[in-house]
């Protein structure tokens, strides 16, 4: 046996059991082809608002570049608390930990909670990190299905909770990849199902600022289940700060003390200057957020109308900046369909299979891109479909 094989056999089995993100897989393929229009990743095409930039520059000039407390700067935690209260979500600054993006927030939360063999309810389709983190930690994934409009199938959910007795349930609205949001009625139904269960609820609300409905609904709004809800959010999408890596976790002390241990030993604290920038954003840049949300809504409506005219079965997105059309009339294999679309039409999307078994037969299109890019991509897709199907 070569030394290479010897050391490969010494790697973590849990790590071996996960794959590279299907989102990144197709994003990385773009560079192999010329003149590709990529609608793969959730990277807003807007710049960081100017006041946030100025705040970060000022923080450097004022030498605010040292470690912060593990929980993050008090100013940012206070502003997050205020922001959430406007959405009827009540967490004090003491309940908040600033993380290195939402990704580290999710990892810290799951690590603090999951033991080997613990059952975790995860929607399908869903953001792939949930399943990968659970696999890394040795937990057992229990998928709960969504309806054709990507709302929760409550009857099947109740059955799964009754039979499986899951320790944790992941809720993710506004949704990546589907663009779905919770209605008030759905939120109440979910609360009614969970209120008497011991299940811990992790609510990923990274896209809370990009909800096109007048009313924002979250499972974290109910005070009677506050002790078992954990909210994960961040500023990558809200302020276009994807590379600056600032997220946050909200939880009561019974959870936060353990989450903080993981966070502390993993990263110590989030980047100091980016924290100051995010704090300024919450104080001064909410008009920028509204402007960007309006643009995303306009783009989503455009992509939806084009896809409908092309004959796709598709639901209109109500949040985030993704749309998830069915490609079942063309192919049963979303990866093969996406490969052909990339090679033959020079349009890159993400196959629905990247988001779990429930995503097969769909593709995810990100409309976080300019209207010119979206029009070019859809024109190419239209021409390709007419010639090939």
Image (cartoon, grey):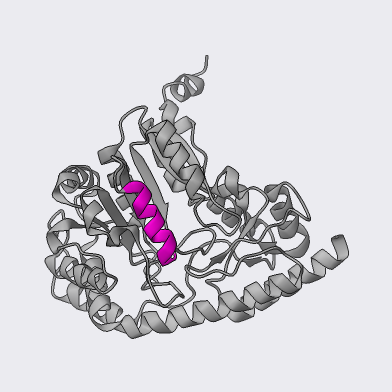
Q: Is residue 193 magenta?
A: yes
Q: Is residue 103 visible?
A: no
User: How far across and how far down the image is residue 301, in percent?
Assistant: 59, 77
Q: Residue at x 69, y 60 (%)?
A: 33
User: How far across and how far down the image is residue 60, in percent?
Assistant: 19, 72
Q: Is residue 281 visible?
A: yes
Q: Nearer the viewer, residue 146 or 387?
A: 146
Q: Residue at x 53, y 52 (%)?
A: 24
Within the image, what quadrant is residue 96 found in?
bottom left
Q: Is residue 366 left or right of residue 329?
A: left
Q: Is residue 93 left or right of residue 148?
A: left
Q: Nearer the viewer, residue 185 or 210?
A: 185
Number of numbered discs present? Answer: 0
Q: Residue at x 32, y 63 (%)?
A: 234
Q: Residue at x 25, y 65 (%)?
A: 89
User: How far across and how far down the image is residue 133, in percent?
Assistant: 40, 41
Residue lying at the far top in this picture: please name it: 1
Q: Which residues are magenta?
A: 183-194
User: How far across and how far down the image is residue 107, in percent?
Assistant: 33, 45
């Amino acid at each position: 046996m070569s030394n290479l094989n010897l050391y490969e056999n010494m790697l973590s089995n849990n790590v071996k059991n996960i794959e590279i993100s299907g989102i990144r897989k197709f994003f990385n393929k773009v560079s192999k082809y010329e003149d590709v229009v990529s609608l793969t990743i959730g990277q807003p095409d807007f710049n960081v608002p100017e006041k946030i930039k100025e705040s970060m520059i000022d923080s450097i000039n004022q030498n605010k570049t040292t470690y912060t407390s593990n929980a993050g700067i008090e100013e940012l935690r206070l502003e997050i608390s205020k922001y959430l209260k406007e959405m009827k979500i009540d967490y004090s600054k003491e309940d908040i930990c600033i993380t290195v993006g939402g990704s580290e927030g999710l990892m810290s939360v799951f690590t603090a909670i999951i033991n080997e063999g613990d059952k975790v309810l995860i929607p399908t389709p869903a953001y792939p990190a949930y399943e990968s983190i659970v696999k890394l930690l040795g937990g057992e994934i229990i998928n709960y299905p969504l309806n054709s409009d990507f709302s929760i199938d409550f009857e099947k959910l109740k059955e799964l909770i009754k039979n499986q007795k899951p320790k944790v349930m992941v809720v993710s609205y506004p949704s990546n990849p589907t663009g779905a949001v919770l209605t008030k009625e759905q939120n109440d139904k979910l609360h009614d199902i969970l209120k008497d269960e011991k299940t811990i609820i992790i609510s990923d609300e990274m896209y809370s600022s990009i909800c096109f409905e007048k009313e924002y609904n979250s499972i974290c709004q109910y005070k009677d289940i506050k002790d078992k809800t954990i909210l994960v959010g961040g500023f990558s999408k809200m302020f276009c700060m994807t590379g600056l890596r600032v997220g946050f976790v909200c939880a009561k002390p019974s959870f936060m003390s353990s989450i903080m241990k993981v966070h502390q030993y993993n990263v110590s604290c989030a980047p100091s200057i980016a924290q100051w920038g995010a704090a300024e954003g919450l104080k001064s840049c909410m008009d920028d957020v509204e402007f960007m949300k309006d643009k995303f809504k306009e783009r989503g409506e455009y992509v939806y109308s084009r896809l409908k005219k092309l004959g796709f079965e598709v639901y209109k997105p109500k949040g985030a900046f993704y749309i998830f059309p069915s490609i079942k009339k063309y192919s049963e294999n979303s990866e093969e369909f996406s490969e052909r679309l990339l090679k033959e039409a020079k349009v890159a999307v993400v196959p629905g299979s990247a988001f779990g078994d429930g995503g097969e037969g769909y593709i995810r299109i990100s409309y976080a891109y300019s209207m010119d890019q979206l029009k070019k991509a859809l024109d190419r897709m239209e021409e390709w479909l007419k010639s090939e199907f």
